[in-house]
Amino acid sequence: MIRLDNGRLKVFQTRLAMGTYVTITVVSESRHRAEEAIGRAFEEMTRLIDIFNRYDSSTPLSVLNQQGYLTGPPAELTDVVTRAIEICKLSHGAFDITVKPIVDLFKNHGDDRRPAPDDIDETLTLVGSDKIELAVDRIGFQRAGMGMTLDGIAKGYIVDRISDVLVSHGVDNHLINAGGDIRARGARQDKRPWAVAIQDPQKKGNYPQVVRLTDGAVATSGSYEVYYDQQRILHHIIDPQIGTSPNHNVSVSVMSESVMQADALSTAVFVLRQTAGKRLIESMPNSSSLVIDSNLTQYRSDGWPSTHDEMS
């Protein structure tokens, strides 16, 4: 906790979750209110992780992947899957939550060589959000062996819900950072917008740009995060159309009205080529992007600040 000159307090807590560090920073006049709100927000985070975590065999998402169907799914799971299917359609398949079989193929193949093209082609028959059967009381797959990963959208959804909990407990000024999935509301201690640094994909600790937010979200997808082979060719972002990792971009940051939307769009734009990615972003309300390609050339869509402009 830091006591500020204006009589307010800056309170922050960090916890390890979702494979990263999640930090909540709030500015409030009451220490008790701030700490209570942060505690409730982390409780909500834990509750939602217990729905979306595909590495825990007891979660609804894991049961769906194991059985190929899930009856009586939690409303939160249905909401996220519904939005994921919508973004899949809008991106013409560049974002697709059914790439889990391809991810598993990469992970289980070892790091000495790439999977054979025939293995990739066979696994691709299990990919496609059009093969998801979605109803209010049931989620299922049309083919045995299909699976779902919500890694590219659920963390954003959770950050949005954390923010909502903070607001419901009277903490309007806050910043949440969950490993690059960022939600800002209100103002920081000096009553100015929150400053969010965009990570340099080639040099840790270097930031090519700082954007300022008063009520918005930023998410970044990068090929520099997780690799499945020693050559660093196969990474955690998969092109659902061809079943391999795109290499024309190294980083995509998206600003949008929610972290869930920014999260999914950053993955979609990473997969798409420049023209198609820019077209997708500019078709979405209150969204913009910064793309850094494999030559480290930067491309800004309409609406992305050219300097340190504020997004409100």
Image (cartoon, rainbow, N blue to C red):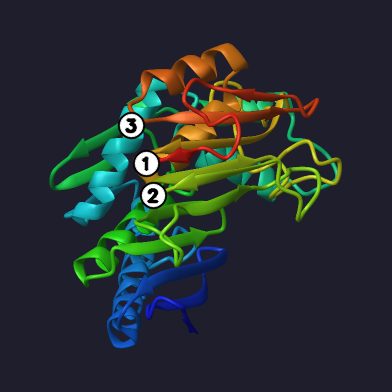
Instruction: Locate residue 290, reporting x and y percent.
Output: 59, 31
Circle 1: residue type: Ser
Task: Find residue 167 and name its label.
Answer: none
**Disc 2, disc 3: CB below 8 Å?**
no
Q: Is residue 146 above or below residue 171?
A: above
56, above or below 197, in the image: below
Residue occupied by mark 3: 85
The answer to whether 117 appears left or right of 41 in the picture is right
Q: Going by the picture, which residue comes out furthest to the front?
A: 6
The label number, if any, that marks residue 312 in the structure image: 1
> What residue sits 51% from the left and 60% below the top?
178
User: How far apart are the two marked residues, 2 and 3, measured between alpha carbons?
Assistant: 29 Å
Instruction: Between residue 58 and residue 82, name the one nearer to us.
Output: 82
- In front here: 192 or 294? 192
Separation (CA) of disc 1 from disc 3: 28 Å
Q: What is the number of the mark on residue 214?
A: 2
Question: Which residue does the image show at 46% across and 42% down from the upper left?
Answer: 263
Picture quadrant where residue 148 is located? top left
Extreme residue in the top direction: 275
Helix, strand or loop at label 2? It is: loop
Q: Answer yes or no: is residue 122 visible.
A: no
Q: Which quarter of the figure has residue 147? A: top left
- In the foreground, 84 or 43: 43
The amino acid beneath tag 3 is Ile
Would residue 82 be visible to someone looking at this image?
Answer: yes
Q: Earlier in the sequence, mark 1 or mark 3?
A: 3
Are the two marked residues, 1 and 2, in contact with CB atoms closer than 8 angstroms? yes
Expressed as whole percent of the image width and height from the top left, the position of residue 242 reads 61, 22
x and y percent of residue 173 in the render? 34, 63
> CB of mark 1 within 8 Å of CB of mark 3?
no
